[in-house]
Image: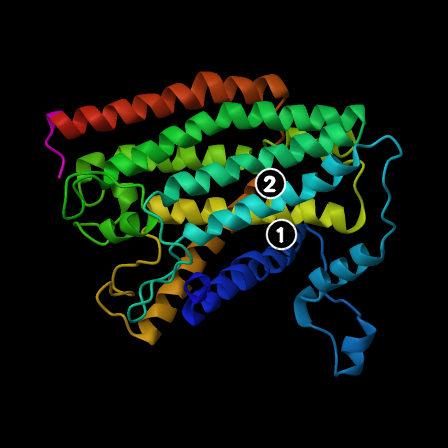
Amino acid sequence: MANFLPSLPDVLKIAFCIGFFVLGITPLLVIIERRLSAFMQGRVGPNRVNIPWLQRMGGVLPGGLGQPLADVIKLLFKEDFLPASADKALYYAGPVLVLVPPALGMIVIPWGNRIGNEHLQVADLSVGVLFAMSVLSVAVYGLAFGGWASNNKFSLMGGLRASAQLVSYELALGLSIIAAIMLTAGAGPDALGTVDPREIVQRQTHGILSWNVFGGGDLKMAPFGLLAFVLFFIAALAENNRVPFDLPECEAELVGGYHTEYSGIKFSVFMMGEYVGMILMSSLMVTFFLGGWYFPGVTDPADHSVLAGLLSVAVFVTKIMTILVFYVVIRWTLPRFKYNQLMNLGWKRLVPLALANVLAIAAVGVLGGAK
């Protein structure tokens, strides 16, 4: 029975992964989005939060850092209602299915170099890429369930839009991942590609430029890697229902979309699931294309000390936070697409372009003898 119990290092890695990446970065991302949005719109935004018990302890958190805490307190005490004609089981399952799958996807992400014999990764799966994409695709069921179970036409329309959007853009996303896997072939000790996230990062520490986005050190593969990264980022915006692809929650047409009939803590779980999905997508982009925890001249793959491990985690977090900031900037830079534009972009532009990119990588790799 004791063999089934996790070891202390495993418990610590699980606690760090959930406590920091899921529960830690999410509140920070909320305040970053609100402050950066205010800056781009020429207003102040949340800059101070007067929480009485915090004030009695000596003051308020600077820069509006207490705003996420105030939001949690407000949502906990907000009236929680249930539509009379709602399907209760699916109604309550919706928010959970939006939050849990992307949180599970984080367990296969290598967020740091090895410390001693311990890999900074909760689950070292040889098929980690497939696992992450599988659990991420389950999140759409939460949107569909929430829209259907609410028995609201606007909510149902939001759930249907989310389902159609996922089908349209997951093809381009998957083809971009195939391109990233193909670019790892030949960059490591063998000539085969891999779907192990830790091995993908390790192979990006080899080569001239040491970046998968540049073809793993092969300059002639650089344009294809860069194109795969751009396609992945665009598809990730659609997967996370972020502007300009936020049609499932378009307030101009659908009131609030799939979460119209949700309030209080259930609404906050929907929103938290969106942010955790953004964190997972950013982590996958960093893992596939930006070297993961590796940065030339800063982290040493052969150094397995505690200090080097912490530095590699800092590098990884810096990379994903940079991508998350771009998520926010794009929100207040591009207008929302019309639904026909969204479908045309996915099926007539991104999918053919991603497929052509995969074929080009194969052709150049075979004819040009990619290394």
Q: Give percent across and percent down for residue 98.
A: 62, 42
Q: Give percent across and percent down for residue 202.
A: 25, 53
Residue 303's image quarter?
bottom left
Q: Which residue is mark 2?
A: 331
Choose between 180 and 130: the one closer to the eye: 130
Left or right of residue 220, residue 137 in this image: right
The answer, for residue 328, to whether it is visible in the render is: no
Choose between 328 and 51: the one closer to the eye: 51
The answer, for residue 147, to whether it is visible in the render is: yes
Mark drawn on residue 33? 1
- Residue at the front extreme of this rendering: 1
- Residue at (31, 71) in percent of width and height: 308
Please tell me whether mark 1 sits on a helix, a strand or a loop. helix
Kind of residue indicated by mark 2 = Arg
The answer to whether residue 311 is above or below residue 183 is below
Q: Give percent across and percent down for residue 348.
A: 46, 16
The answer to whether residue 36 is above or below residue 371 is below
Q: Residues within 10 Å of mark 1 (few under 14, many from 20)?
A: some
- Residue at (14, 35) in percent of width and height: 370
Kind of residue indicated by mark 1 = Glu
Q: Quadrant of the C terminus?
A: top left
- The CA distance from mark 2 to mark 1 is 9 Å
Please tell me whether mark 2 sits on a helix, a strand or a loop. helix
